[in-house]
Image (cartoon, helix red, strand yellow):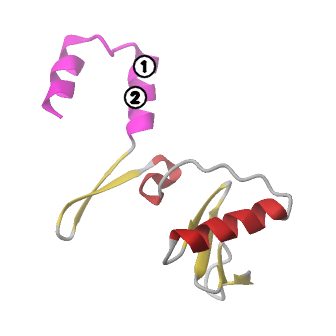
């Protein structure tokens, strides 16, 4: 892979781009086959790879297109953990708000 001249966490190989942020990363390419090949090459180099979801959930932030030029960003896993840690999942106000969504 070729390291980006602009960002030290960005690498390229052919039409595949690899973005590294701390211990999370994204592989992107025009086709799934190209991404799958890059994953196999990484595994073949002896590195561990864990597939944790779609790019829309990268770093625990869920991205959802709401309308043209509008994206909603949420952290559902973090919100659920905070609610659980605070012990308010059964609180009346929480149940009422949850029903609105």
Q: Is residue 15 magenta?
A: no
Quarter location, residue 16: bottom right
The residue nearer to you, when weighing 5 against 53, is 53
Left/right placement of residue 46 relative to residue 71 reads right
Please tell me whether mark 2 sits on a helix, a strand or a loop.
helix
Residue 96, given in percent of the width and then of the height, sits at 15, 20
Please tell me whether mark 1 sits on a helix, a strand or a loop.
helix
Please report the residue visible at 45 percent of the width from the left and 51 percent of the height from the top.
Answer: 57
Residue 17, given in percent of the width and then of the height, sits at 59, 77
Question: Magenta segment, which residues?
Answer: 76-101
Q: Residues at badges 2 and 1 in contact (C-beta under 8 Å)?
A: yes
Quadrant in which the C terminus appears? top left
Within 10 Å of disc 1 (Cα), the crowding (few <14, some 14-19, many 20+) is few
Placement of 11 over or under 65, stated as above or below = below
Q: Label 1, on which residue?
A: 84
Residue 56, given in percent of the width and then of the height, sits at 41, 57
The residue nearer to you, when weighing 64 against 30, is 30
Left/right placement of residue 74 relative to residue 37 reads left
Q: Label 2, on which residue?
A: 80
Q: Is residue 79 magenta?
A: yes
Left/right placement of residue 31 relative to residue 69 reads right
Rounded to the nearest angstrom, the CA distance separating label 2 from label 1 is 6 Å
Residue 100, given in percent of the width and then of the height, sits at 13, 31
Prevailing SS of the magenta stretch: helix
Placement of 11 over or under 61, stated as above or below = below
Left/right placement of residue 93 relative to residue 8 reads left
Quarter location, residue 34: bottom right
């Amino acid at each position: 892979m070729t390291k980006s001249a602009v960002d030290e966490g960005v690498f390229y190989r052919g039409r595949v781009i690899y973005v590294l942020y701390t211990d999370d990363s994204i592989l992107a390419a025009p086709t799934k086959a190209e991404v799958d090949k890059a994953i196999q090459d990484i595994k073949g180099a002896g590195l561990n790879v864990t597939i944790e979801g779609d790019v829309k959930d990268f770093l625990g932030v869920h991205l959802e297109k709401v309308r043209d030029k509008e994206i909603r960003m949420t952290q559902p896993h973090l919100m659920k953990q905070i609610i659980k840690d605070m012990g308010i999942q059964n609180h009346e106000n929480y149940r009422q708000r949850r029903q609105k969504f």
